[in-house]
Each structure stands twice: as structure tokens, then as C-alpha cells.
Amino acid sequence: MTPQRRENFKRLLKPRHIAFIGGRYAIIAIHEARRRGFGGEMFAVNPTRSDLEGVPCVASIEELPVAPDAVYLAIPASDVVGAVRTLSDMGAGGVVCFSAGFKEAGNNQTELDLIEATGNMALIGPNCYGVINYIDNSALWSFEHGGWSPGYGAAIITQSGMFSSDITMSQRSLPLAYMVSAGNQAVLGPEDLLEFFADDPAVRAIGLHLEGLQNIPKFEKAAIKALTKGKPVVVLKTGSSAIGSNLTVSHTGSLSGSAELYEALFQRVGIISVTNPSQLLETLKFLCVVGTPKGKQVVGFTCSGGGATMLADHAEKLI
């Protein structure tokens, strides 16, 4: 992430003002921002409505009173590149692009045009749910969400909007700091977000749901930085089956790759690899509340002989 884009991502994550551009989904996003407790200014852009959820509308981006720190964009894909270019030219901080119909739909050139139009802005997506900041109470989010924070917690980066939403609604008492649904990762990918959150004092652990990676050397560097900073990383890698691998291409345009190679990568850089959502959330909760274990010492208490056997079998694999 360039220094200028990093500063713009900070604006997107902790905005003074948010512009909501679109119709039905922009209304949902306004509602969710209010539910999260966002107290900054809100603007709305829609050429055919007088207001969105009570926020007065202007007819075009050019009529916005300021260059917004954050933008929620939910308009037809054919209009996205022009809108993003206008926002970049006016000095907006960053965009959550909910709109779909880019690389995941075979429209590679349109996504390349979007990357070029973004300039130095921070862009999440396209084809994503958005960003939730539980520490500063801001949300650019496309769906009902939950989750709580005691002032610290896990930063979770996913490549699935619905999975990220499900995590926020789970009742596992996982403290959350940030949630990012990355979508197609046209501009900002997991490696960029991992590197950024490694520096955040509110983040105690980082969770990743990955379908595939686009820049492995950059990811390795970010993972090692997080480990060095005392932020353990837990990953749930999906798309390991032949059918699952094919589905990732149509979902976010990602190439899944060999499961064995990914596991070797995770082991080399000290990432904890899990195999299902429950393991992801419970491991993150343990790391956020208890901290990283200092060694491989395990003590088990059970009133069941069978339970003791299962515990011993599992513990031995970790030695």
C-alpha cells in the first residue's frame, strides 16, 4: 500500500463524513451506519430521489459539498468506473464498491479500468459487502450486521460477503475490532489489509478467509510483520476441492491454487490454519482473550475416558 493510499484507507476506516451513492442498497447502508453509531456527516447522491433514509440527496457526485472521506457505492457496474474517477479527481478518501459485474463475471477489462480510475484512493471491492469499524463505530455495510467490541478484538478479512455477515451475527462472544469483506480485491487485497492491521493497537489477532492470493511475496511479508508485532494470524482457506476451486473463479475471480502449497506457505510464515468457521472463530476468541500460548504445554480436564482419549490424540498431533 502506498503512503497516500494508506492515509486514504485511514480516512475510509474512520471517516468524518460518508457519501452514499445509489438507491435501495444505499438506504440499507445508511441504516446500518446509524445502527453502528456513526456520528459524522452523511450525504446522499441519487438523481431521482429527494432523500435516502432521511438524508437529503444531490443529483450528482459533483454537487457534494466536500470530498468525502468515505463513499458507499451501489450503482450499475456500467456507471462505476466514471463515478470512481470523479471521486478520485475530487480527492475522496476511499470507496466501498458493492456493485458487482466485474472480473467475477468475466469482465476483466472493466475491472482494469476501475483500478486505473481509482488513482490513490483506497477501494474495497468491487462485489463486496464493505467495512465495519467496531472501535470507532463506523460502517459502510450492505446487510444487517451484529458484533461487539470492548475496545479491542480481531480484525477479520474475508472474500465472502455473506460469510462476513454471518460472523458478525454469530453468538460466540468473539470481540471484534474490524470486519472487511474484500470482494474481488481489485485495489486492496488481503496482503494490504493484513499489513495495515498489524500496526493497529486495538487488533489482538487477525482472521482471514481466503479463496486465493494474488501477490504471495507481499502476503508473506505482511504475515511475518504481523507475527513480529505479536498479532497472530488465523486462516480459513476454502476452494481446496476441484468443484470449490472452480466456484471461487465465478465468486470473486480468484484462482484457488493447490491446497498443499497453501498449507506449506501458512506453516512457513507462522499462520494458524483451520478447516471450518467454528475453528476460525474459537481460535480467534482464544487469542484475543487469552493471548498467544508460550509453548506446546497442554493440560486437559475431563470426566470421560473417551474424552481423554480424543484430547490426547489431538494434542499429540501438535507436538
Image (cartoon, rainbow, N blue to C red):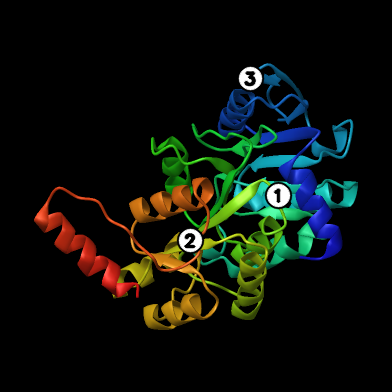
Q: Position of residue 85 (x, y in %)?
A: 80, 53
The amino acid type found where label 3 is placed reads: Glu
In this figure, which residue is indicated by the disc labeled 1?
201
Of labels 3 and 2, earlier in sequence is 3
The amino acid type found where label 2 is placed reads: Pro
- Quarter holding the C terminus is bottom left
Residue at x 75%, y 41% (from the top left corner): 70
Image-quadrant location for residue 242: bottom left
Spatial CA distance of label 1 from label 3 is: 35 Å
In this figure, which residue is indicated by the disc labeled 3?
53
Can you tell which mark lies on residue 264?
none
Spatial CA distance of label 1 from label 2 is: 19 Å
Residue at x 77%, y 28% (from the top left corner): 43
Q: The residue tagged with tag 1: helix, strand or loop?
A: loop
The answer to whether residue 205 is seen in the rendering is yes
In this figure, which residue is indicated by the disc labeled 2?
293
Q: Is residue 71 left or right of residue 141?
A: right
Of labels 1 and 3, earlier in sequence is 3
Task: Identify which residue, 72 or 174, lies in the foreground.
Answer: 174
Task: Identify which residue, 250 or 148, lies in the foreground.
Answer: 148
